[in-house]
Image: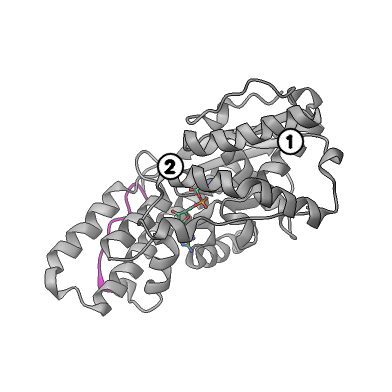
Amino acid sequence: MRGHALHSQVDMHRAYGGVVPELASRDHIRRLLPLTDFALKQAEVRLQEVDAIAYTRGPGLAGALLVGAGVASALGMALGKPLIGVHHLEGHLLSPLLSKQAPSFPFLALLVSGGHTMLLDVQAFGQYTLLGETVDDAAGEAFDKSAKLLGLGYPGGPELARLAAFGNALAFELPRPKMHSPDLDFSFAGLKTAVLTKVRGLGSNLCEQSRADLAAAAQEAITDVLVHKTLRAQQATKRLSVVVAGGVGANRQLREKLSSALSVRGVQLFFPELEWCTDNGAMIALAGALRLQAHPGAARAAGPFDVLPRWDLTQIDVK
Ligand code: KG4
Ligand code: ZN
């Protein structure tokens, strides 16, 4: 990694309690070129020297994707450089390779972000087998929605984790949906409903301590399910390296529980540093660079472009 720049929109979204798509894409327009300049300066590379331009082709909000694809395409045309459209989740999946302590293929990946919860067997670059995924809400959504019910701000995950540190997880009993089902799928919608029921039940008795207790119980339930299913997937695949990627990977309790559960089995656990866990451009550039290396023909001449707001990770065209 030669250079990297990031502008977080979290402060802007916090004011509205969530992502406002139009504001997100307008802000992307403002930030993209100055950030590109910054990263190039840091890398001591001139724009003319890059081999190709990688951008996020999907999935995600169409407006935000169009900004990235449009700028990449314009740069590609002006410079005569080819483009590589990257899948957002492939970026997350490979982000641990940016880490100082990087895993090698093959590995088992738990991908936990605001929109996705998946277990994938990663045999090699570009070879991903989906083992299981959420049938309703994502783990990040479970954190965010529970946080909202507890009156916490955006983004809910880290706020809920902070409050949970003062609570007793045993004070409330919450369900662990699908935890004991034999498949590797997840379900978190019922958990949010259970938190809602507890909040309603307490009514005006929802004091500071019971909010912290509920936060702790919710975090415990979410991480229990994630750890349990990851262990089951490890048993099924016998992979000796497990990687956790995506924003929820920043959760400390998840990290601690997983590392103690896996270390007794002699399995190595890899977490990207926090800056690579949440959305970043370096992971997209890395996925693009690896694709270019493996399939030089994957880069396309700049020209008319499209974005794929809905795009299945197992459907990526690797060549
Ligand atoms: O991967 P990400 O940055 O964005 C995408 O969804 O692609 O993930 C964001 C999600 C949000 O749901 C956020 O609440 C959650 O990651 N998150 C956390 C923590 N940090 C971020 N959830 C639990 N504990 C955290 N420390
Ligand atoms: Zn993401």
* Amino acid type for the residue under numbered disc 1: Ile
Tell me the SS state at disc 1.
Answer: strand
- Identified at 38% across, 66% down, the residue is 160
Residue located beneath label 1 in the image:
53
| Residue stretch rendered in magenta on the structure | 171-179
Residue 68, horizontal then vertical, whole percent:
60, 37
Residue located beneath label 2 in the image:
22
Q: Is residue 38 above or below residue 307?
A: below
Residue 81, horizontal then vertical, whole percent:
79, 30
- Identified at 51% across, 52% down, the residue is 231
* Mark nearer the N terminus (1 vs 2): 2
Q: How many marks?
A: 2
Residue 224, horizontal then vertical, whole percent:
41, 59
Mark 1 → mark 2, Cα distance in angstroms: 25 Å
Q: Nearer the viewer, mark 1 or mark 2?
A: 2
Residue 80 location, quadrant: top right
Quarter of the image that includes the C terminus: top right
Q: Nearer the viewer, residue 310 or 228?
A: 310
* Amino acid type for the residue under numbered disc 2: Glu
Q: Is residue 155 above or below residue 316?
A: below
